[in-house]
Image: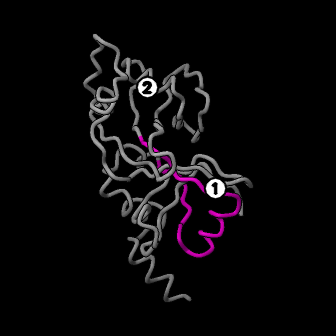
Amino acid sequence: MSVLAPGLLLAAPRLGDPNFVKSVVLLGHHDGDGALGWVLNGKALGPVAKLLTDADLVPTGTSLPESSSYAGVVRVGGPVMPGSAWILFEKPDGHAPWDPEHDLGGPHAVTGAREAVEALARGEGPARFRMLLGYAGWGAGQLEGEIREGAWLPAPIDPALLFATPSDALWDSAYRVSVGTTPMAFTTTVRGQA
């Protein structure tokens, strides 16, 4: 199977894993050793600004920007290392990559670098971002096996799905964009061909 990242994984309508029901996973890394991604529409945890403040990451005297990104909801990005913070962001002009950083093509990237989280806590990070806690990981050959079993539908990244689509509509929207139909219609069509 070819390299799937960067790309999306759309959970099958009847995926049995409760961590991934109706999930849209942004896949940032995939090779022979495994894969790494983040659930874009995971459980909501609260606004970014509140999470940064409650975690005592915002320096004393700092006022965070009143932007849609800081007001945006932090979501569970996956079941692995739920305390790890990841930032999906649009790279500003002249952006020097953080380490680690996963380039998604075009203006988008994901990082788990502590320096990136600290920059956000100072109000100095990228203007447009989403924060995710935890990630999804697969060992060598595991994701490929799950795809063969019909658990996931690989799809290309559509930039509108990363920031402009509401989380509660993301799964349906991703299927419409990628397949041209709703998830249930896609499932019925595939079953009818089997």
| Residue at image point 53% right, 67% down | 152
| 165 lies left or right of 3 | left
| Residue at image point 39% right, 38% down | 130
| 114 lies left or right of 33 | left
Label at residue 152: none
What segment carries the magenta color? 132-158
Q: Where in the figure is residue 63, as x and y percent of width and height?
A: 27, 16
The N terminus lies in which quarter of the figure? Answer: bottom right
Q: Is residue 46 above or below residue 55?
A: below
Q: Report which residue position mark 2 lands on.
A: 126
Res. 19 in view:
yes
Name the residue nearer the viewer: 53 or 159: 53
Name the residue nearer the viewer: 182 or 1: 1
Asked where in the image residue 144 lies, by quadrant, the reply is bottom right
Secondary structure beneath dot 1 equals loop
Res. 176 in view:
no
Asked if residue 187 is among those painted magenta in the image, a careful observer would answer no
Q: Residue furthest top?
A: 61
Label at residue 4: 1
Q: CA distance from mark 1 to mark 2?
A: 26 Å
Secondary structure beneath dot 2 equals loop
Looking at numbered disc 2 in the image, what kind of residue is underneath it?
Answer: Pro
Q: Where in the figure is residue 194, as x and y percent of width and height?
A: 56, 89
Q: Nearer the N terminus, badge 1 or badge 2? A: 1
Looking at numbered disc 1 in the image, what kind of residue is underneath it?
Answer: Leu
Q: Where in the figure is residue 174, as x and y percent of width and height?
A: 42, 59
Q: Is residue 9 above or below residue 57?
A: below
Asked where in the image residue 171 lies, by quadrant, the reply is bottom left
Name the residue nearer the viewer: 181 or 21: 21
